[in-house]
C-alpha cells in the first residue's frame, strides 16, 4: 500500500513545475536568505511573508538547499509526507482494530481523490495531515498506556500542525481531549491533570514562532502577509481565524467568501465542487460510526476500539461542521483533513459490520 501511494503521488511529478508559485517563491527566497527562511518571506529581502506559518516551507527549503531549488525539492517532501501519513494511520488502526481494518483505512486514505491531488502540490495541507495523524497515534498510545509523555507528544504534534496551517490544526483538539478523558486508564483526576499539562505543551509548541516574530521589532522583520497590522497574532485571530469562520473583512478591504468551495451550509460537503473529492465514503463513515457505537457500547471504558470511535468520530464531526459552515475563504482541498477520519471509520466500521453479519446477529 505504501509503494502504491508513493507511485500515485509521485507519478510524472516532474511535470508539476513550481506547483503553487505563491509558496514556491517563499521557498526560493528561503534558499537565498536565512532570515527569509525563518519568517517565510516571499522575497529574499524579507519585505512580506506568505499568509501561513512557515513549517511546510522549511521542509521544502531545507531540501532545496541540498538539491537546489526545483520541482523535486518542492514536491518530494509532499510525497514523503503523504506516504508517511498512510503508514502512521495504518499503524494506529492496526493496534486498535487489527490488520484488515488497518489495510482498508490505509487504502482509503491513500486513494481519496482530494488527498491524491494535494499530495501532488506544495500547499501546506499535506504536512498538516501528517502532524494530525501523528497526534492521533500518540493520543491512542496515551489512552492505551496511561502515560503522560504520549499525551504531551500528541499536543506537540498539534502544535506543529498550528505552525503549518494555524487554527485548522486546532479543530481536532476537542476530539483528542474527549477520547483521552473518556477512555484513558488513569483515574479521572489524573486524566484531568494530564490534559492540563498537554494544554500547556500545546500552547508553547503552537505559539513559540508567533511570539518570536511578534516580539521582533517591525523594522527588523517582514510584514506578515494576510494580517492588517503586520503581526502573526492578527493573522491567527483574523484572516486565518475568525475570518475563515464568519467571513470577516480581508486585508484587501473585501470580505472573505466561500465561493471557491460553494455556499456555506449543511450540503457543502456534497456539492459539485467538494462531493466527488472527499465525500464518496462520507455517508458510509457516518453509518459505520453509528453502528460501531451500537456494537461496542457495552465494552469497557478503556477499550481501545471504542475509544477510537470517540476520537475519529469526533474528528469527523468537528471538521465536517467547520468546513460546512465556514463563511470565509474556503477551498475544496482543505477537506483533505477529513480523509483520515473517513478512512478509519470506513475501515473499522466495515470490518465491524462484517463481523456482526458473520456472528450471532446474523
Image (tube, grey):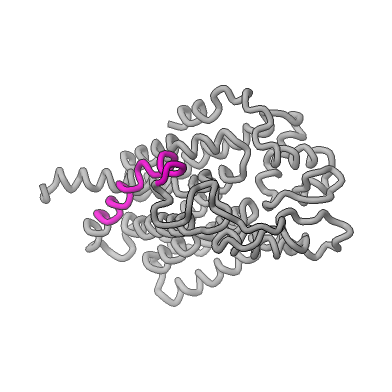
- Residue at position x 35%, y 43% in the image: 281
Q: Quadrant of residue 113?
A: top left
Q: Position of residue 246 (x, y in %)?
A: 55, 63
Pick the residue in front: 233 or 1: 233
Instruction: Tell me the magenta residue range.
Output: 271-292
Residue at the far bottom: name it. 189
Q: Quadrant of residue 317?
A: bottom left
Q: Position of residue 130 (x, y in %)?
A: 54, 46
- Residue at position x 31%, y 48% in the image: 283
Pick the residue in front: 305 or 264: 264
Q: In the rendered view, would you say 189 is above or below 233?
A: below
Q: Is residue 333 left or right of residue 19?
A: left
Q: Quadrant of the N terminus?
A: top left
Q: Is residue 304 left or right of residue 259?
A: left
Residue at the far front: name it. 254
Q: Position of residue 286 (x, y in %)?
A: 32, 52
Q: Position of residue 302 (x, y in %)?
A: 33, 63
Amino acid at each position: 500500500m505504501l509503494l502504491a501511494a508513493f507511485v500515485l503521488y509521485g507519478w510524472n511529478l516532474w511535470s508539476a513545475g513550481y506547483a503553487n508559485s505563491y509558496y514556491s517563491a517563499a521557498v526560493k527566497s528561503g534558499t537565498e536568505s536565512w532570515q527569509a527562511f525563518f519568517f517565510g518571506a516571499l522575497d529574499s529581502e524579507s519585505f512580506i511573508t506568505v499568509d501561513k506559518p512557515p513549517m511546510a516551507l522549511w521542509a521544502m527549503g531545507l531540501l532545496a538547499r541540498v538539491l537546489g531549488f526545483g520541482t523535486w525539492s518542492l514536491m518530494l517532501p509532499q510525497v514523503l509526507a503523504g506516504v508517511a501519513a498512510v503508514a502512521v494511520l495504518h499503524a494506529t488502526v492496526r493496534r486498535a482494530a487489527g490488520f484488515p481494518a488497518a489495510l482498508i483505512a490505509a487504502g482509503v486514505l491513500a486513494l481519496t481523490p482530494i488527498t491524491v491531488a494535494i499530495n501532488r502540490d506544495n500547499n501546506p495541507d499535506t504536512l498538516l495531515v501528517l502532524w494530525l495523524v501523528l497526534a492521533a497515534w500518540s493520543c491512542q498510545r496515551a489512552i492505551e498506556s496511561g502515560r503522560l509523555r504520549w499525551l504531551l507528544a500528541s499536543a506537540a504534534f498539534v502544535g506543529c500542525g498550528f505552525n503549518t496551517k494555524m487554527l485548522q490544526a486546532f479543530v481536532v483538539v476537542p476530539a483528542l481531549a474527549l477520547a483521552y478523558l473518556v477512555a484513558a486508564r488513569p483515574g479521572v483526576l489524573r486524566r484531568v491533570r494530564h490534559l492540563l499539562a498537554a494544554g500547556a505543551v500545546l500552547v508553547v509548541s503552537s505559539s513559540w514562532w508567533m511570539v518570536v516574530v511578534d516580539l521582533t521589532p517591525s523594522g527588523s522583520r517582514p510584514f506578515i502577509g494576510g494580517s492588517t497590522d503586520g503581526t502573526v497574532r492578527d493573522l491567527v485571530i483574523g484572516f486565518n481565524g475568525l475570518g475563515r469562520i464568519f467571513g470577516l473583512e480581508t486585508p484587501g478591504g473585501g470580505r472573505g467568501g466561500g465561493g471557491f468551495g460553494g455556499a456555506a451550509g449543511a450540503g457543502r460537503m456534497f456539492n459539485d465542487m467538494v462531493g466527488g473529492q472527499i465525500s464518496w465514503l462520507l455517508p458510509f463513515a457516518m453509518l459505520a460510526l453509528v453502528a460501531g457505537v451500537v456494537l461496542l457500547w457495552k465494552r469497557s471504558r478503556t477499550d481501545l476500539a471504542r475509544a477510537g470511535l470517540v476520537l475519529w468520530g469526533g474528528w469527523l464531526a468537528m471538521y465536517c461542521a467547520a468546513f460546512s459552515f465556514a463563511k470565509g475563504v474556503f477551498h475544496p482541498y482543505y477537506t483533505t483533513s477529513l480523509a483520515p477520519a473517513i478512512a478509519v471509520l470506513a475501515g473499522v466500521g466495515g470490518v465491524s459490520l462484517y463481523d456482526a453479519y458473520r456472528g450471532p446477529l446474523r
